[in-house]
Each structure stands twice: as structure tokens, then as C-alpha cells.
Amino acid sequence: MEIRSIKRAAAVLRSIVDKPDGMSSTGIGEITGLSKATVHRILYTLASDDLVRMEGGRYLPGAFLIALAADSDPFRDLKRTAAEPLAALRNATGETAALVVRRGTQRVTILVALAFHELKAAPDVGSTKPVHAGAAGKALLAFIDPGELEILLDGYKYARLAVNTVMSQAQLLRNVQRVRQQGYAVSSEESVDGQAAIAAPIMLNGGVAAVVNLSVPVVRASKRAVREWTPQVLAAAKAIASAERSRVKANGLAGVSRRTRL
């Protein structure tokens, strides 16, 4: 049997967590179909337990909800492993380095080391883009089993995000094949106008666990700069993969050791 008040509160939370920039109470009411008074009562209750917070007139996930999400984050260990190599890549290149994973036909940014420049690429953690747009998406697709890739792209809709966005499956597959051959992806104004990127896969257990994505304003993405940065992006991806394999192996051996002592 459903409890209506809990179902309404869940609908309010869902409307908030789906929007990285937060939601106004009016917007929440429009999405959930709840009255203004009901939305305010639910938000007041959720805020009292740190499940939501208000910032600049918009509601965002609260500290307790964020903590719950972190505990269930399947990429928590990978993000910890990747934090130092991403920061090192940012420091070496001066540009924004990010960790990106695939969720269906979307790519999701899960960790960011922001550039120090005033003019910089600044992807938000949790932001998504379709996989056909940009270097990160192509790097995520390039090492998928061809049969799985065919199923994934069956009926896929190509939307234009920037001036050079890939707009056909034939073009995407050509790009993916090139990435598979050279081991990394590059793009210029495919997902964001004025932005270029270099991406390299983090290979674990025979597949791509994530990619390292270096995002750069096109005014600094000269051919010479891209040539210099590409080996560094590849090295960061390999360093993360190596560290993650070592972490998993160490944890496995520790588990065996503990069981032996028992």
C-alpha cells in the first residue's frame, strides 16, 4: 500500500536531484503537479532534515542526501584513485581535466580538476551530454564490443550541440574507428562552441571504465598544444588504470589475509 505523503516527498526530491542548477518551488510544483502549499510543506520538512537546501531562491540536494548518494556511488573508489592524476594533468597542462563515464547513451562528468585560467572550460560534476558529441563520448564508445555498440546506437537521435557536432551514424562510426586505432580522441567545438578536448580511455577488466577528458578553450588548443598534451592525457589515463588495478589487488589480498587469520 502506497503512503501518499512519502510518494509526494519522493516526487519533490526527484525533481530537485534531476536538475544540477536546482529548482524553484514554482518549478517543483509544475513538475510534480502538487499545489504551492503542499510543495512548501514538503520542502520545509525535507530541509529540516538536511535532505534539501535553498540557495539563491532555488532548492538543491542537502548535505544528508549528498552523503547518502556518496555512500552508494559506484565510482567512489575510482574517483579517489583518479583525483591525484587528474590534478597533476591539470597542473601540467594548465587546462581542465575531468573523469567521464558512460550512462547508456549519455556521458556523465563525475570528477573535475578545474583550470586556473580565468577563461577556462568548466564542466559541472553530474553534467551530462550525449555520447556522439565530443572527444569523451567517442573515447567511451571506441572500445565497446561492436555488437554492443550496434545495439546501443540503434535508433539513436543525433542532436546538434555545437558547430561541429557529429550528425550521422556513418560519421560517428568513422570517428570511433579512428579513436580505436590511435588510442585517444580529439574534438573541436563538437559539444560546446569555443571548446576543444582530448580524451583517453581508462582500461580496466578488458573494457573502458571511464575516460580522462582534457577540456580547452579553442583559442589555446593549437595543433602544437594538442600534440604536446595528448601524451600527458594518455599517461594520466594509464596511471589511473594502474593505480586502480593495484588498489583492487591490494584489497583482494587483504581480504584473503583476514579470512586466513580467521
Image (cartoon, rainbow, N blue to C red):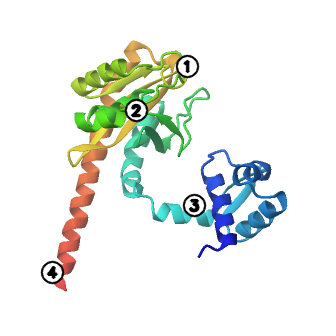
Contact, mark 3 vs mark 4 (Cβ under 8 Å): no
> Which of the two discs, 4 and 2, labels the residue nearer the N terminus?
2
- Left or right side of 181 for 233: right
For mark 4, what is the residue?
260
The reply to whether callout 3 and callout 2 are in contact (CB within 8 Å) is no
Circle 1 sits in a helix, a strand or a loop, which is it? loop
- Which mark is first along the chain, 2 or 1? 2
Number of the label disc, if any, that sits on residue 66: 3
Q: Quadrant of residue 211?
A: top left
Find residue 194 and name its label.
1
The first of marks 3 and 2 along the sequence is: 3
Amino acid beneath label 3: Ile
Residue at horizontal 78%, vertical 53%?
25
Circle 4: is it few (<14), some (14-19), or many (20+) Cα within 10 Å?
few
Residue farthest toward the front in the current orientation of the protein:
1
Indicate the secondary structure of the residue bearing disc 3: helix
The alpha-carbon separation of the residues under discs 3 and 4 comes to: 37 Å
Mark 1 or 2: the one toward you: 2
Residue at left 68%, top 61%?
Answer: 52
Question: For the residue marked with disc 2, what is the amino acid?
Answer: Ala
Which-is-in-front pick, marks 3 and 4? Answer: 3
Residue 201: give x, y in percent of width and height.
Answer: 31, 37
Furthest-top residue in this view: 223
Report the residue marked by disc 2.
136
Q: In this picture, is 13 found above or below 19?
A: below
How packed mark 3 is, by other alpha carbons closer than 10 Å (few <14, some 14-19, many 20 or more), is some
The residue located at (42%, 42%) in the rendering is 99
Marks 4 and 2, how far apart at CA: 43 Å
Q: Secondary structure at mark 2?
A: helix
15 in relation to 176, above or below = below
Q: CA distance from mark 1 to mark 2?
A: 16 Å
Q: Where is residue 224 drawn, in percent x and y?
A: 38, 14
